[in-house]
Image: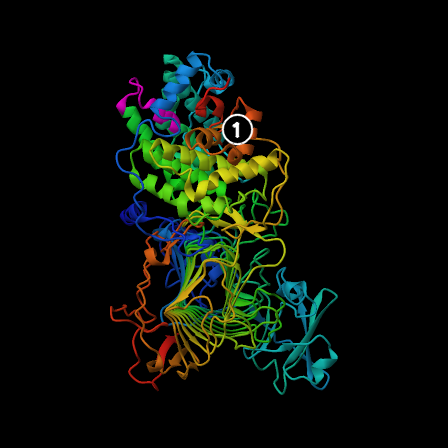
Amino acid sequence: MKAMKSILRISITILMVCTGLFGRAQVLRLETPPFYHPKPFVHPGLLHTTADLKRMKEMVAGNIEPWKSGFEVFKASPWSSAGWIPHPVEHVERSLLSGAGKNIGDLEKDVCAAYQNALMWAITGEEAHAKKAIEILNAWSAKLKVFDGTDVELGAGLCGFKFTNAAEIMRTYPGWAPADIQRCKKMFMEIFYPPLQYFALWAHGNWDLACMKEMMAIGVFCDDHALFDRAVDFYYKGPGNGSLPHYVINENGQVQESGRDQQHTQLGIGHLSEMCEIGWSQGIDMYGFLNNRLLKGFEYTAKYNLGEEVPFEPYTDISGRFPAKIISASGRGRLRSIYEMVLNHYANRAGLPADQYKYTKMAADKLRPEGAGFNADNPGYGTLLFSLKAIN
Amino acid sequence: MRTSFYFLTASALFIQLLAFSVNATPGIIHVAKTGDDANSGSVTAPLLTIKKAAALAHPGDKVIIHKGTYREMIPLQLGGTNETTRISYSAAPGEEVTIKGSEQVKSWVRAGDHGWRAEIDSTVFKGFNPFAEWVNNDSSYAHLGEVYLDNRALKEKKDADAISNTEYSWFAWQENGKTIIIANFGRSDPNKQLTEITTRPSAFIAERPGIGYITLNGFTIAQVASGAASVNGLQPGAISTNGGSHWLIQNCILHDCKSVAISIGQTGHDYPTASPTKPAYSDLSQDTARVGHHIIRHNHIFHCGQAGIFGLLHGSFSLIEDNLIEDINDDGEFPSEECAGIRLALAIDAQVDHNLIRRINGKTGGYGLLMGPLLQGTRISRNIISETRRSCLYFYNSHGPVLIDNNILAGPGKTGGEAVKMLDAEANVFVQNLFYDGGFTNDRVQGRPTATSNFLPHSLVIKQTIPALAMDDRWFSNLFIKSGLDGLTDNPDCLSDYNVYLDGAIASSWGDKHSKTIAGTAGFTLIHSSKGVGLMLNNRVIPKLLSPVLSPSVTGFFALSKQFLEYPDGRGITIDHDFNGSVAGKTGKLPGPFYQYFPAANKVQSLFTY
């Protein structure tokens, strides 16, 4: 029986890819995923490449804006402290059920601390931060056995993503024992990956996206191209709400969750941009897909949250469960720290005309320096982490 | 005198010792109408009552009951803990054992020209008086009690005056602590013939929740005043597992049970404040080892008011097979929507296989199978269902997947309703069925959607609680006669293909690319006998189709429920066998439950024999 299950699971892992074959499908079909990336992966190659980390380090050391003020905010976070005490446990649960949600808060805080300490080490060169990041990663990989709960896709996707990014940065640290790195990979593959392997086709798009971005991240960290390809394929044409065409639903930039609230909308487009950033690190331009559709989602969302009106098309999402007739004002105006990454790509890498990223820039300008990314939701601190040009 | 005293004392001690020996090691306890409850229970000194045997039985014991009629309710206080310590209760091989929930009445006196009157003392009822209680507390219907003349139920009347001019009827009331029954027995003298009134609510009943590993084998159970059951309330039955697990109920005949014959449920309740953070049914056990796993096999259930088999939760992981369930809710007036041949709720990995279910009547209910809420991994296979007042199958509030394969479902006709009704029920996969004259509905409840839970595969751990829609349904390789899928709209991700539509049945407008519509008729007829059914079908008019073998990779992965169509042990199901167990060849096969052409068009194919 176990053998049968293993065979089934392996065959899914090897073969499964989600296609839009059936339109609004919520039943996954088994097909061979397209090959999106030539081997080998760039390391570190998730949100931050070697060049990115070098730039941050030099700019912070040179007290150059906006990195200088971005770093000041970043450094002040308790999660950037080498004095952080991790609280690893065997069982973590993210659940909507009343009274459930065991230890998820501890994990969320620890993954933020691991990620930010890894960045602190990369920026300051201080060994204490490297050791802290490794300590947190090792502590959890030694102890964590079970990750479950009704919302485990979100828990594993969001927490896993920051943790994997921390590990990807720290893989260049000579003090991280190879055996510990292997154990960390095992944790990602055996604890974090299983809950998100089938995405979340029944849910709002941010669920799919939490799965997608962590799947992509694990793919890079563990040099597993099949995982990477599945996540990228879902971004382009997955059947759930999380694919780009299903999440930023039209050329106006309306987002699948615009009719729900503005917090989740920003969370979701933030996830999309993080996938694009990983793609960029690996030499794939996912930002440009569908004529820069992602940017349109950011523009629409930023414009509305900056107080202007946007057109809204009544829309029933791809799962059929979340019809929306009007845009939701819930959370309107509470900008999240997601704008710098996208602004810097389209303005400084892609070189688009300024009118195409007008509202994204306004949001970034308003927030600058960007702060935390709301627990484990998004990386945040975009001013420090994703700025590409100095600002006088 | 002194000698007698010592003799009696020694005898009593010896009997106690024998009883102790029965208890100390797994053994066999005999019960016979010639026995005595002071006996040891050996074959030569059997007990008189099954109840006494149950009180003595310990895990691993086998209780053998010898021929005769036993008028008792048997509370079960102990069960086994695994297959080897199962406590079994069996009719002795070749002997007829009847357990009745009734008592004989011989004290009838003449009351007028056509009536007889009996005064029944309250002591007869032992605390439960079915003539003082209404079914479902609905005084417009009937009392729980019944009156029988020579094993035939008389009709209850609500008016004493109606008795005189209605043969075989009765009327009852309470007076001065006694139950007064007046009855019209036609020309019969009730004191000379067998006259019985129901006095007990169950035959076998687990005394508390959680009693498992019980076997009941070979009994006739009749005339039981079982109360009405509700998924969100009490779930009594003539056999009541009362929240236990791993019962084996086989080769039994159950008839004339007022409501439910076999209850495998447990007491439920409403969830008025249910929400995704506190979903309905989240307070039930998640311990799969102590839930369901019943086998209900080869029983004949008939003349019961509400349902043959009923249960919340403990249909999970259970197998219900080879049962003949017929003539449920004879008068069609039972006051409940939950009237069905089989009615299960929260039935994870339940298997309902090869049952004949027919003549299911109902006022507001009357379904062959009434299933929901919460189905996942459920399989309904090789059943023959006909003559139902409402749908042969009704699924509601479920995320699935549910596999419905190789069934023969004769619907109530286009004007009588649908053969299959789905309401907020997702992911129902219909493969190789024969649908005759019924059609489908697939709808959502209007207004605020119901939050419906699904589970981690093959478990009772709630995974997600979200609205269930009308989506993800499949129809592959079915044979539709007279009614098809034309009534269904193109719900999200519903697929239909490789079907054949006959005799006026119309294909879906949104699928059926490779399906065929045939103008002719196949002469479908079900030939019913007293203990079975056969099929007349000229299947030579049906074309063979090169349809794909439906392996898990073809039927797909049901993303919400995180599973393929799977057996309870997690293996993927490939649907490559037909009703008779024939294997699909590579050269095409007939749609419907028979892969091959029948040798002769006018020959009756046996489908079920009890």
Front-lying residue, B302 or B416: B416
Q: Residues in magenta?
A: A165-178
Q: Position of residue A375 (x, y in %)?
A: 51, 28
Residue that mark 1 sits on: A337
User: Does residue B36 appear anywhere in the picture?
Assistant: yes
* In the rendered image, the vertical position of residue A168 relative to residue B225, given as above or below: above
Front-lying residue, B434 or B16: B434
Magenta-drawn stretch contains A347: no
* In the rendered image, the vertical position of residue B8 relative to residue B275, given as above or below: below
Q: Position of residue A291 (x, y in %)?
A: 44, 42
Front-lying residue, B26 or B501: B501
Q: Position of residue B392 (x, y in %)?
A: 49, 70
Query: Chain letter of disc 1?
Result: A
Magenta-drawn stretch contains A169: yes
Front-lying residue, A221 or B94: A221
Which amino acid, by three-letter code, is at mark 1? Ser
What colour scheme does the image use?
rainbow
For this view, does B417 lie left or right of residue A233?
A: right
Q: Position of residue A286 (x, y in %)?
A: 40, 39
Residue at horizontal 57 percent and vertical 81 percent from the top: B193
